[in-house]
């Protein structure tokens, strides 16, 4: 979701102006904190920062913090931390996936090579922790360390399943949990922590954002098949081309014919759509309702997120978060 869409769901122009100001400070913080003594790291960090990311995770942290307290400058610093962590995961993911495009531009591994990108991703991880350490709050570090371990475990679990057709729905949900929902949940929890909220409030916000993150990832899996390449910022059908069977295909394969299953296996084996056209895979998904079922499940997570958020008093920030949540299961990019 672009910041422009975020503006649409914030009823108070003053609040949006405030969020914009916070996000500008976050951008400045990221720029300052991404300067390394090795030029390659700085260049890669600046390349990622200028690529037009959604900044959804920092926005989530900032809105949660403002909804439950007065976070001050700590919220800006932690918003920069989660975005730098996210950038580190993107650098490593592109190396692992051998990606060619990211957000419509050549991916970092194409520009600078795998070796440089792995080490630069490591530096970004450590820099995020270095910034967080300045808060002198062990709970913040506990959240971030637990999050990082979950994300790495999620990537390892996904790697174990690359090229395999016998992936289960439970496998997909576990990967979505560890790779995406855990980060969303951590953003909301960190927002509560820097705002001085209680552990109960932190838990409720974490539950809200976890469901939001699950909906976000499931819609990403759908959009990988249905979005336009110019909108997606990378080639459509990329997950299957990289050997990943995601939830839409898992659902479709439950009732697919042997011939249809063989078509999917061919793409997995060849890692291309040369022998089996992408349109053929899309037809299999539509014929067996794989996309519709995932969208329905994404809506269930959205409903749970809204229910968790509904426990908080009405406020401009609460309405903004509710609006973001409503848009999540219907996003087109």
Image (cartoon, helix red, strand yellow):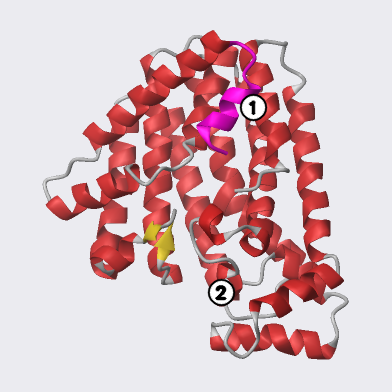
Of residues 252 and 149, the one drawn nearer to the viewer in this rendering: 252
The answer to whether residue 227 is above or below residue 188 is below
Where residue 205 is drawn, which disc sits there?
1
Q: Is residue 133 visible?
A: no
Where residue 160 is drawn, which disc sits there?
2
Q: Is residue 2 magenta?
A: yes
**Res. 293 image quadrant:** bottom right
Q: Secondary structure at mark 2?
A: helix
Q: Residue at x 69, y 27 (%)?
A: 323
Query: Residue 315: percent from the left, percent from the top?
Result: 67, 10
Of residues 38 and 260, the one drawn nearer to the viewer in this rendering: 260
Q: Residue at x 78, y 70 (%)?
A: 285
The answer to whether residue 180 is above or below residue 322 is below
Q: Is residue 86 left or right of residue 110?
A: right
Separation (CA) of disc 1 from disc 2:
32 Å
Of residues 28 and 83, the one drawn nearer to the viewer in this rendering: 28
The N terminus sits in image quarter:
top right
**Res. 222 image quadrant:** bottom right
Query: Residue 98: percent from the left, percent from the top?
Result: 41, 72
The numbered mark, 1 or 2, whose residue comes first in the sequence reads: 2
Q: Is residue 225 left or right of residue 285?
A: left
**Res. 325 image quadrant:** top right
> What is the crowding at mark 2: few (fewer than 14 residues within 10 Å), some, or many (at least 20)?
few
Query: Residue 150: percent from the left, percent from the top?
Result: 53, 52
The answer to whether residue 225 is above or below residue 51 is below
Magenta residues span 1-12
The answer to whether residue 179 is above or below residue 302 is below
Q: Secondary structure at mark 1?
A: helix
């Amino acid at each position: 979701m672009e910041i422009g869409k975020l503006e649409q769901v914030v009823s108070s122009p003053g609040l949006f102006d405030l969020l914009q100001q916070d996000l500008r400070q976050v951008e400045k913080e990221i720029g300052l904190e991404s300067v390394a003594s090795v030029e390659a790291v700085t260049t890669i960090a600046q390349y990622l920062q200028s690529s037009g990311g959604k900044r959804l995770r920092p926005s989530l942290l900032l809105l949660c913090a403002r909804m439950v307290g007065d976070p001050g400058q700590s919220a800006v610093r932690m918003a920069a931390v989660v975005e730098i962590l996210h950038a580190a995961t993107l650098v490593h993911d592109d190396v692992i996936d051998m990606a060619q495009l990211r957000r419509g531009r050549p991916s970092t591994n194409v520009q600078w090579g795998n070796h440089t990108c792995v080490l630069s991703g490591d530096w970004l991880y450590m820099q995020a922790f270095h910034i967080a350490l300045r808060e002198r709050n062990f709970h913040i570090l506990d959240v971030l360390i637990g999050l990082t371990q979950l994300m790495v475990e999620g990537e390892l679990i996904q790697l174990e399943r690359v090229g395999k057709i016998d992936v289960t729905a439970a496998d997909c949900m576990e990967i979505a949990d560890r790779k995406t929902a855990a980060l969303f949940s951590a953003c909301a929890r960190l927002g509560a922590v820097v705002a001085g909220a209680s552990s109960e409030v932190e838990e409720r916000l974490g539950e809200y954002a976890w469901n939001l993150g699950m909906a976000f990832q499931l819609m990403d899996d759908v959009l990988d098949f249905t979005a336009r390449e110019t909108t997606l910022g990378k080639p459509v059908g990329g997950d299957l081309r990289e050997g990943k069977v995601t939830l839409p295909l898992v659902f479709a394969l439950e009732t697919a014919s042997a011939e249809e299953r063989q078509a999917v296996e061919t793409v997995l084996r060849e890692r291309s759509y040369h022998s089996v056209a992408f349109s053929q895979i899309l037809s299999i998904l539509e014929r067996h309702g794989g996309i519709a079922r995932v969208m329905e499940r994404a809506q269930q997570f959205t409903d749970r997120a809204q229910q968790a958020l509904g426990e908080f008093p009405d406020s401009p920030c609460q309405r903004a978060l509710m609006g973001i949540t409503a848009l999540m299961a219907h996003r087109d990019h």
